[in-house]
Image (cartoon, rainbow, N blue to C red):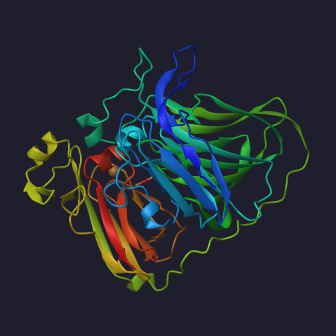
Amino acid sequence: MSAAVMTPRAGLRQLASGGHPATPIWGYDGRVPGAEIRVRQGEWVERRLQNALPRPTTVHWHGIRIDNAMDGVPGLTQNPVPPGGHFDYDFIAPDAGTFWYHAHTQSMEQVARGLYGPLIIDEPSPPDADRDLPLLMDDWKLSPETFEIKDDFDNFHDLSHAGRIGNVITVNGQASAHFAVRRHQRLRLRLINAANARIFDIGLSGLGGWVVALDGMPLDMPAPVTGALTIAPAQRVDLLVDVLAGGGETAALLWRGHDGSHPLVRFSVTGGTRVRRPAPGPLPPNSLPEIVDAANAPLHRLVMRGGAMHALPPATLNGTLMQPRELALLGKFWTLNGVVGMAHQPFFDVARGRTLRIAFINDTGFHHAMHLHGHHFRPIAGDGSLGPWRDTVLVRPGHARQVAMVADNPGKWLLHCHMLSHAASGMMTWFNVRA
Ligand code: C2O
Ligand code: CU
């Protein structure tokens, strides 16, 4: 059997509403988002990447505990696929949950142009819900005159501040995403932050329910939604929500900006039933490694430095110690443990199966969404307890977060900030798990 083909290429998408022109994008098969890939837990995903872009590219299957050779990182796990070339991805999806795929070559540009899509792995018996809606949130930096994507991807301001923040917000490539629902329907909403750098704060209106999974991994118990949900770039939040608004009303997901709340997704409500379903139980757990005695596991410190308003000490780029002024001229504004971008030596090198801790120490004035490839980890709370499994952790300015993990997936894995402008500007390293 030959695998299905996914073809990243140029396309056109109506991103801005209000009679503005459509926007030239890059998308898988020319679409934004790319087609939903959905298989059952434990099944194979097989796709031939056929590159119809004018640039080399690769695909990363974000959050999948994948075979290293399929991870899509150019220079580390594969060669970039040249224009006209192809690469066959095939891997088992070990965990049920909400994942996504995106370009991982020049990602700061390629993801911002639209190269991403949902990757949904179904539980053997999915939870009771009337609708299952993957919702890929993004922001686009469009020219206010032409509505074309601004191609200033590597402008020094975005690189050295919060990253590339757009002026048009979309869900599933639409400025005003809209669904028709019925009162008391239960919706499974799979929120995926595909933006380059924007942290979304999401609220519910006319909807009530629970967070049931984070970054693809089920919570031990559904957590009632009581306030805003903070979703950093690359993070996912699975909700089970009931439509509480009445017939004729509009329920919504809202996003909070500095100028107040705005609808992100609208749900127009008709009819429905009088009774709500009982509260849901937890999703079936994925088989993740057990973390034993985290407090005594070896601790690896990752110190983040740089960015606007925080002077960078001299730092190493490609093995050479350089002054911050020289680095800035090259668009390099950030360091991890004093190194800009990929170091020759891995951040850590461990035998397979080892439990370890990482301390992410944010010595900068900006947020960073730190992502590990090939593994999930658990944040360690102040009292030593382990939080929910994640693959991306948001570290606030001036704060530190410790996480614990079992390095059980052999290979060379990337670790980087998922604010893609930051990654391109220095915040990228790697670790090795020996087979
Ligand atoms: Cu979605 Cu290297 O990341
Ligand atoms: Cu960052």
Left or right: residue 187 versus residue 288 is right
Residue 70 to residue 132: above or below? below
Depth check, front residue: 397 or 336: 336
Residue 287 at what x, y percent from top left? 61, 75
Q: Quadrant of the C terminus?
A: bottom left
Residue 257 visible in image:
no
Residue 84 at what x, y percent from top left? 41, 39
Left or right: residue 301 versus residue 245 is left
Q: Residue at x 64, y 55 (%)?
A: 1
Left or right: residue 44 versus residue 89 is right
Q: Quadrant of residue 264?
A: top right
Q: Quadrant of residue 279?
A: bottom right
Residue furthest toward the front?
Answer: 1
Residue 128 to residue 9: above or below? below
Residue 248 at what x, y percent from top left? 82, 29
Q: Residue at x 63, y 70 (%)?
A: 286
Depth check, front residue: 334 or 252: 334
Left or right: residue 383 versus residue 306 is right
Q: Residue at x 15, y 50 (%)?
A: 311
Q: Residue at x 78, y 31 (%)?
A: 249
Q: Quadrant of residue 247?
A: top right
Depth check, front residue: 34 or 178: 34
